[in-house]
Image (cartoon, rainbow, N blue to C red):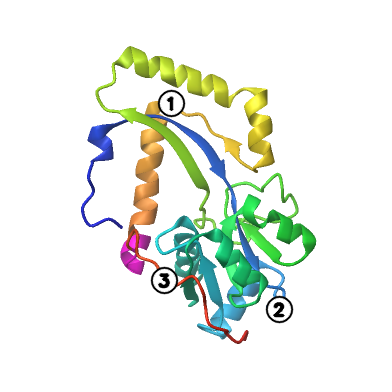
Amino acid sequence: MVSKMPFDWQKDLALLSLVARVPEVVVIHPSLAVNTLQDLVAYARANPRKINYGSAGTGSITHLAVELLKTEAKIDLVHVPYRGAAPAVNDLLGGHVQMVVLDTPVLLPHIRSGAVKALAVTSATRSAALPDVPTTGEAGFKTVLSDNWYGLSAPAGVPPDVLEKLHKAVVATLRSPELKKQFDSQDAIPSPMTPGEFASFVKTEQAKWGPVVVATGAQAGVNCPTLLPDVAIA
């Protein structure tokens, strides 16, 4: 998504550990008369380009997650990028877009109030905050996984003994009950890894998302207006 990267992560960074995964959830406006992800896919196939989905911006995980679903489900949806999750949620609540895929903490209050409907979490396992909502894999779309994840790294060249001390401190913290309690409040999952495991994870993510970026032509920093004109809901 960046025409010229200022660094090469494999040469210029020393990865320490994945820190946390935050599940995302497929949510729709109640006016869209579907109750499951399978229903949504069936409707979208019968009504191409009739569903508008909002995202936190072009190239964001909230954009690419839906593009991944579009590819696997063979459906055609209309992307409406915003400058952040908040305006996307506002327009979802207003019915200007009919669908979003965003982090569960962002959508949880609206799901619980019934203002929007959760169809599936885009994680390998169900969300503790939404135990009754199936995963995309349970709905038949096993490759549609889009946890929002965070990790720690240091500059390349940091002495190995220092990196080892940092890694031990990170793992100990991620396994502490105090931090887990804080993460639980944000529906985040502590995810300690060895540096090697973290590097392998990043390479796997690149292999998964690279083709999606190429297919969509997404570019970092390129966005669209925050407001969408009134759109009739099909």
Q: Quadrant of the N terminus?
A: bottom left
Q: Which residue is mark 3?
A: 224
Compare residues 203 and 64 and report the one nearer the observer: 64
Residue 209: image x %, image y %?
A: 38, 55
Query: Which numbered disc, 2 or 3, marks the residue that appears first in the sequence?
Result: 2
The label nearer to you, 3 versus 1, is 3
Q: Residues within 10 Å of mark 1 (few under 14, many from 20)?
A: some
Mark 1 and mark 2: span between their CA atoms? 46 Å
**Marks 2 and 3 in Cβ contact (< 8 Å):** no
Bounds of the magenta span? Answer: 212-218
Residue designated by label 2:
31
* Badge 3 or badge 1: first in the primary sequence: 1
Q: Is residue 11 above or below residue 104?
A: above
Earlier-in-chain disc, 1 versus 2: 2
The image shows a total of numbered marks equal to 3
Residue at point 35%, 15% (across, down): 162
Percent position of residue 122, x then y: 57, 55
Who's the residue at 66% across and 75% down the image?
94
Where residue 46 sits in the image (x, y, percent)?
57, 85
Q: Which amino acid type corresponds to the residue marked 1 in the rendered image?
A: Thr
Q: Is residue 84 above or below residue 204?
A: below
Quarter where residue 88 is shown: bottom right
Which residue carries the number 1 mark? Answer: 194
| Mark 3 residue element | loop
Q: Are marks 3 and 1 in contact (CB under 8 Å)?
A: no
Q: For the point 78% across and 61% down, which residue is it?
A: 113
Q: Which mark is residue 207?
A: none
**Classed neighbour count for the residue bearing mark 2: other residues with Cα under 10 Å, few (<14), some (14–19), many (≥20):** few
Seen as rendered, the residue at the extreme right is: 113
Which amino acid type is shown beneath numbered disc 2? Ser
Q: Is residue 53 inside the magenta stretch?
A: no
